[in-house]
Amino acid sequence: MIAACFPRRKTGLLPALLAGMVCVFSAAPGWGEPPAAEVQRGTVRFEPLEDQQQLPPRFRLGPHTFPYELERLETVSRQIEIYRLRFPSPVKTPWEQNNTVVCEYYRPCGAGPYPAVVGLHILGGDFDLLRLFCRSLAHNGVCALFLILPHYGPRHAPGGPRRAIGPDPYQSVQAMTQAVLDIRRAAAWLAQRPEVDSRRLGVFGISLGGITAALASAQEPRLHNALLLLAGGDLRQLNWQSPELAPVRREIARRGLSLEEVLRIMQAVDPVSYAHRLKQRRVLMINGRYDQLVPPACTEALWRAAGRPPIQWWDCGHYTAMRFVFVAVRETVDFFRHSRPPEAVGGVNR
């Protein structure tokens, strides 16, 4: 039961939470309309916070400068502002549209400094779900940068992949690597914003977004606060018989690949491979007790490798977790409102 999983708190979040949900499914930012305002242009200096030799070569980023464009979008709210952010991806792929990172930036109307997070969407690319979370975060004093993963939405090129994870394991590894590097640049962009507390940054995601968030937090120390929803690791434990993975199974068979070979290739972006680095982060995991796509064994593999951070088990499956969406938003808001800088947790996630 929901009451058994989530004790009542006197947090005072409900009024602001409801305000954050007003009109979330109407007047969503589009991609083809004329600019809503003058485009702001600037540059960001990326400086790694640790020796990049400690990271796998695929996830390294050395010191560099990159440009960005920021465009204000129309919103009915007087409490938050919404912007469209674009900057070049550190990875150049054969598909030009995919080489520009597109984000939606939700921020409170105020000087701050506020904690800030990068938000990541699900495998199916349901953007409205992430917009719900991001609006609610902004209404509750947290800046939220919704980053669109490679090959989705405005990043999809005709003839190119439609998802970050697909039947070609080499392409999937490339897309997930690109996603992590895109997120590292996004964290640097947030860190230089005057309204953002650069020491209180984080990342969250749902399902594929949660898996990607675990990868990104492990590689980018700026993203010290990580909330992983319906995520897991050790991809061998995924339910490969799930209907959602049926097209992938068919294409793997057509290519003459074995599942064992695919899993060997995908190990390069399996969060369990790097989860030991999450022991130095502040992590919260929220998962479904009856999840059939990301089974408990998959979740527990990531949980153990990450140092057994706090974890909540909901009485739901992967898709029936939507019954708890308002609780999920509340938990996310509460977690990031209380984001902490690295030294505040003594080097241990809790």
Image (cartoon, rainbow, N blue to C red):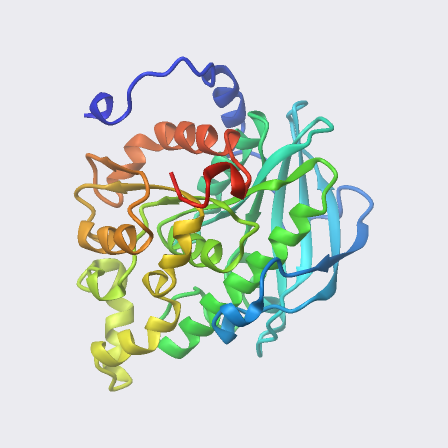
Quadrant housing residue 325: top left
Q: Residue at x 19, y 49 (%)?
A: 296
Q: Residue at x 65, y 53 (%)?
A: 188
Residue 263 locus on image (x, y percent): 27, 74
- As rendered, which of 182 and 112 lies closer to the eye? 112
- As rendered, which of 43 and 258 lies closer to the eye? 43
Quadrant housing residue 135: top right
Query: What is the number of callouts on the image?
Result: 0
Residue 34 locus on image (x, y percent): 74, 48
Q: State the quadrant of the C terminus.
A: top left
- Image check: 308 left or right of 330? left
- Image check: 276 left or right of 69? left
Up-down relation of residue 214 to residue 88 (above or below) = above
- As rendered, which of 301 and 162 lies closer to the eye? 301
Up-down relation of residue 63 to residue 127 (above or below) = below
Up-down relation of residue 244 to residue 283 (above or below) = below
Can the viewer see residue 312 in this picture? Answer: yes
Residue 241 locus on image (x, y percent): 17, 63
Up-down relation of residue 163 to residue 213 (above or below) = below
Q: Residue at x 36, y 76 (%)?
A: 169
User: Please, which residue is most extreme toward the front here?
Assistant: 346
Q: State the quadrant of the N terminus.
A: top left
User: Please, which residue is most extreme toward the bottom here?
Assistant: 256
Residue 270 locus on image (x, y percent): 35, 65
- Image check: 4 left or right of 344? left
